[in-house]
Amino acid sequence: MKKEKKITAPEAPQVENDSEYLVEVKNLVKWFPIKSSFFKRTIGNVRAVDGISFKIKRGQTMGLVGESGCGKSTAGRTLLRLIPKTSGEVWIDGKEIFSLSKEELRQMRPRIQIIFQDPYSSLSPRIPVGEIIGEAVREHEIVPAEEYEDYISRVMRACGLQEYHKDRYPHEFSGGQRQRICIARALALNPDFIVCDEPVSALDVSIQAQIINLLKKLQKDYGFTYLFISHDLSVVEHISDTVGVMYLGSMVEYADTEQIFSKPLHPYTEALFSAIPIPDPDVKMNRIVLKGSLPSPANPPAGCKFHTRCDKCMDICRCAKPEWSEVEPGHWCACHLYNTKQQQKAAEATMRKTKRAKGKKFDEQKKAEENVL
């Protein structure tokens, strides 16, 4: 089936980069400084996003999952340059977004949009719906002034809203309708890439299905590329082409949806997927219950960040950070269980070096205590 033209029917934007990947994220880092109460000196950092890398193909959806507080939403907002990065690169359609000037970024803005998590707080209560959807359209001159009203009506109909909703205010709508308004606001700018930041988590299950089906239909009709952030694994499995799993600011696994759900490699991914409910009373679930609680992102564990909760933890996990590598074709993982000989050798060298440093520190401490006595 041939894809429809985008809503801005006059002329679809020309593809500037012929790469099959629209979005490429390379070692993206976002740390938030911790300031002392009196002198306001930086005494530490909250490592919200700690060096993640992934790619998203044009017209596809990547799901980003993990526990609450693992850095999913921060990653989504950072790669759109809504908040500044600490380091790393984000390439969107062949352009490194953090190297763009203010004017270049302004021209890029309509092509990269976000649907926020809360449809209640992300809409201004003082502006009618038609103006909420059309404000940025007018600002960026997406369509000529004489076509403006008709264009907004077409966008609203595409998102399941009626034309007479234009003059109403957000408080007059239900949660599902508000989320449709948020989708229409993003869609109106004719974007190439949309970050969906948990767009259905605040909605009832029946409304969730409507919004997910709407997003899939819009993608099929207009070829949008999505980064779908969620902690609802059933929704992610339904909508995503690829899935990335985050833990404590780091990416621990990435693969095609079918591949990662049928054969998860990382122990954290296994535990996460074991919590997916199966709607069959005769099926016994093998739930993996993680011990302990999520460590602080301001003081993450040494070595593998997951080793404090992992039932497959080895000595090497406590000392050496696992490398992000392709274990199988298209299946990436960061775990010492899948080390190559070269990776294992390097990790063991790091472990010996760490143990020597710890032993030296222990001896110095013991000697200091003896001198005091």
Image (cartoon, rainbow, N blue to C red):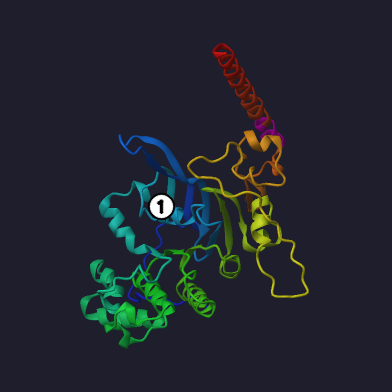
* 193 to 103, vertically: above or below: below
**Residue drawn where x is 36% and y is 66% of the image:** 13
Question: Horizontal placement of 5 versus 343: left or right?
Answer: left
User: Does the magenta segment cover residue 345?
Assistant: yes
261 sits to left or right of 208: right
Q: Position of residue 212 (x, y in %)?
A: 51, 74
**In terms of image quadrants, where is residue 169?**
bottom left
- Give the labeled residue for mark 1: 78
Choose top left, top right, bottom left or bottom right for residue 182: bottom left
* Quadrant of the snapshot with the N terminus: bottom right
Residue 266 shows up from this direction: no
Question: In the image, what residue type sits under mark 1?
Answer: Thr
Q: Residues within 10 Å of mark 1 (few under 14, many from 20)?
A: some
Is 277 placed above or below 302 here? below
Tell me which residue sits at (34%, 34%) in the image. Answer: 41
Percent position (x, y) of residue 342?
68, 33
Q: Which residue ends up furthest to the left in the rendered image?
A: 145
Magenta region = 341-347
Report the residue at 53% width, 80% height from top: 206
Q: Main secondary structure of the magenta part?
A: helix
Left-right relation of 23 to 331? left
